[in-house]
Image (spheres, rainbow, N blue to C red):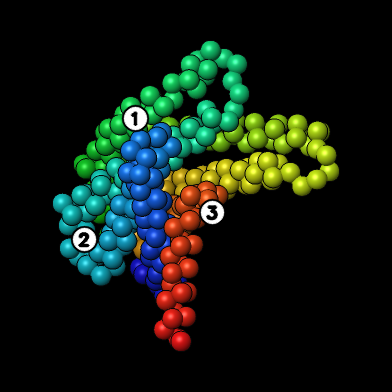
Amino acid sequence: MLTLFSLLILTIAIIESMAGLLGNGTILAVSSTSCLRSKILSSYDMIMICLSLSRFFLQTWMMLDLFLSLFCEMSYYEENLFVIFKTVFMFLNNSSLWFAAWLSFFYCTKVVRFTQSLFIWLKQRISSLMPWMLITSSFFSFATSLPFAWDIYNVHVNFTDPLTMTNSSERKVTMKASLFVLILFCNAGIALPLIVFVVSSILLIRSLCIHIRQMQNIATGFRDPSLEAHIGAIKSVFSFLILYVTYFISLVLVLSNFFLPLSMGEAMCIAVMAACPAGHSMVLIWSNPKFRELPARILHHTNCHARTRSV
């Protein structure tokens, strides 16, 4: 049952999603413009376009899903509509997780110094491999989202029925079935990119820490911009890691139907799931001067226009 507090949390989730749309729209616009100007699609721009585009559609879909579940509940839980919404959500979600994982992997190959022959081979060929990695992960996301087209609806309907003593045991059985399906079909879609992201981020943080120690050992006592850049990079990567893992935990709780529909617990998970992609995009904009340039330019033009009107 939807409480006042749950409604407040869901309203916050919608505001977070709108902030995410703004952030990802900025990244998409800047990356696309950069490609059009240079007429070269770099691996970094390719990842950023795929990531921002998938998150833009994901957060739009989440808002639409939330509006329908709140204001069109009867028609929303019709079988076809509910199945379509959850299947598309899982495809966009899995794609977003994979693209974020490839971004971390790309940073890792560019920064970390490897001695193993396999990693050296990957480092040398990452530019030519990246398009195929993005395409393959997109097809893989589509394949791992298909189980939601025939199983999750039945689980959800059982959870939306009133709980009595007789169907309480049925809920436990259904919960086990739901978890089994998640483990069997969906873990590949959400756990594999998590592993890639976490391993790449840890290697990246470790490498940056080693670089910082080496710089501190040869420091002259003056302010070193390179050292500050490395510290800023560690903060960015660590924040990416926290946001990614937090999003993953909230996603698993929602997918496993751990909370009742529209309960306070589910509302908080939805709010976290809306906040993490938005937060990730904001950190990307803050840490990259190229992405900061567009919002700064818009703000400057807005201030100039306001001053002109006041005069």
Mark 3, Cα crowd under 10 Å, few <14 / some 14-19 / many 20+, is: some
Distance of label 3 from label 2 (alpha carbons) = 38 Å
User: Which residue is found at the position 27% from the left and 32% from the top?
Assistant: 139
293 above or below 187?
A: below
Residue 115 found in image quarter? top right
Earlier in the chain: of badge 1 and badge 2, it is 2
Q: Which mark is residue 76?
A: 2
Q: Which mark is residue 131?
A: 1
In this view, the mark in front (3 or 2): 3
Question: Can the viewer see residue 68?
Answer: yes
Distance of label 1 from label 2 (alpha carbons) = 37 Å
Distance of label 3 from label 1 (alpha carbons) = 26 Å
Residue hosting label 3: 286
Mark 2, Cα crowd under 10 Å, few <14 / some 14-19 / many 20+, is: some
User: Which residue is found at the position 50% from the left and 36% from the top?
Assistant: 104
Q: Quadrant of the N terminus?
A: bottom left
249 above or below 3?
A: above
Q: Secondary structure at mark 1?
A: helix
Type of the residue with mark 1: Pro
Type of the residue with mark 3: Trp
Earlier in the chain: of badge 3 and badge 2, it is 2
Q: Where does the image place residue 45, in percent across and percent down from the top left?
A: 40, 40
In this view, the mark in front (1 or 2): 1
